[in-house]
Image: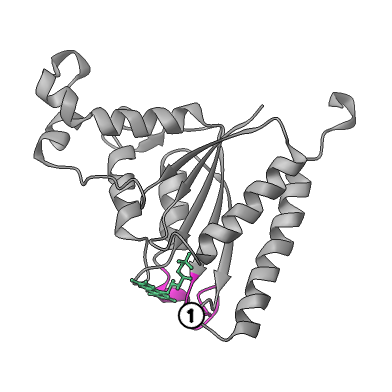
Amino acid sequence: MTTILRIDASSRTTSSISRSVGDYFEQSWLTHNPRDLVLRRDVVTDPITHIAQQTITGFYTPADRLTDELQTATALSDRLIAELQAADMLLLTVPMYNFAVPSAFKAWIDHIVRIGHTFTYDGSSFSGLLTGRRAYVVTSHGAAGYRHGDPFAAADFLVPYLRFILQFLGITDVHVFAVEGTTGDELTLTAAIERAKREIDAVVAAASIVPVAAA
Ligand SMILES: Cc1cc2nc3c(=O)[nH]c(=O)nc-3n(C[C@H](O)[C@H](O)[C@H](O)COP(=O)(O)O)c2cc1C
């Protein structure tokens, strides 16, 4: 059984393209893998407070020297990291806001990218500690043209950032389903969603093939 941690980040809790394509992925995945478990973290309906002075002090304090106050200040980070550690697979749904991730999602990142817990630094290089996991990411973009070689590729601080952060944490098996042109006309939007769904069908089917020997 695979434990999936799904994280949703669109401020729209209805009519959100990233959430609905994420639902499609989830349903498709569970159809192929009915015993898998989905855990959820919604950074919009359950907002993550920003890290504060004491949170940062706690991050840099060795575990055996944490005071009650520092333990309280890092408790949310502990919980969010435990959710990640318990997961074998991530499903992230993240819209593009001002060419980057929504601030609600960035607040989550600031809690989970934590030295000694999800990465290490030896003075010259970093190592991610969340290895052995894979991530599926659904992004939604109002405009089209952010893909590699397209006119706005240089303005995409969403997909490259997500890929970088995941890889920084040790998650190198990452697949992104980008739904572009969501603020375009109905035809454009439908075509973009259908394209993402076809891609999801293919990726989920390929990921769910059970080797003959193991069947
Ligand atoms: C605050 C805000 C900022 C946005 N910034 C961008 C942007 O920089 N580039 C873009 O292509 N679309 C932008 N959009 C459009 C969204 O990416 C688009 O509507 C997307 O579908 C939102 O995701 P959702 O449908 O899951 O809510 C922005 C929308 C909002 C609300």
Horizontal placement of 213 versus 195: left or right?
A: right
Comparing 41 with 138, the one in front is: 41
Please tell me which residue is depicted at 24% across the width and 28% down the height of the picture: 75
Horizontal placement of 10 versus 87: left or right?
A: left
Residue highlighted by disc 1: 143
Q: Residue furthest right?
A: 212
Q: Is residue 149 magenta?
A: yes
**Mark 1 C-beta to ligand 1 under 8 Å:** yes
- Locate the N terminus by quadrant: top right
Kind of element beneath mark 1: loop
Please tell me which residue is depicted at 54% across the width and 84% down the height of the picture: 184
Is residue 176 in sight in this rendering? Answer: no
Please tell me which residue is depicted at 47% across the width and 38% down the height of the picture: 170
Please tell me which residue is depicted at 45% across the width and 28% down the height of the picture: 85
| Placement of 213 over or under 103, stated as above or below | above
Q: Main secondary structure of the magenta part?
A: loop
Give the image location of residue 33, x and y in percent.
73, 36
Quarter for ligand 1?
bottom left
Magenta stretch?
141-156
Q: Is residue 9 magenta?
A: no
Q: Looking at the picture, which amino acid does disc 1 mark?
A: Ala
| Placement of 53 over or under 85, stated as above or below | below
Give the image location of residue 207, x and y in percent.
73, 43
Comparing 168 with 33, the one in front is: 33
Horizontal placement of 31 versus 13: left or right?
A: right
Horizontal placement of 121 versus 155: left or right?
A: left
Label 1 neighbourhood size at 10 Å, few (<14), some (14-19), many (20+)?
A: some
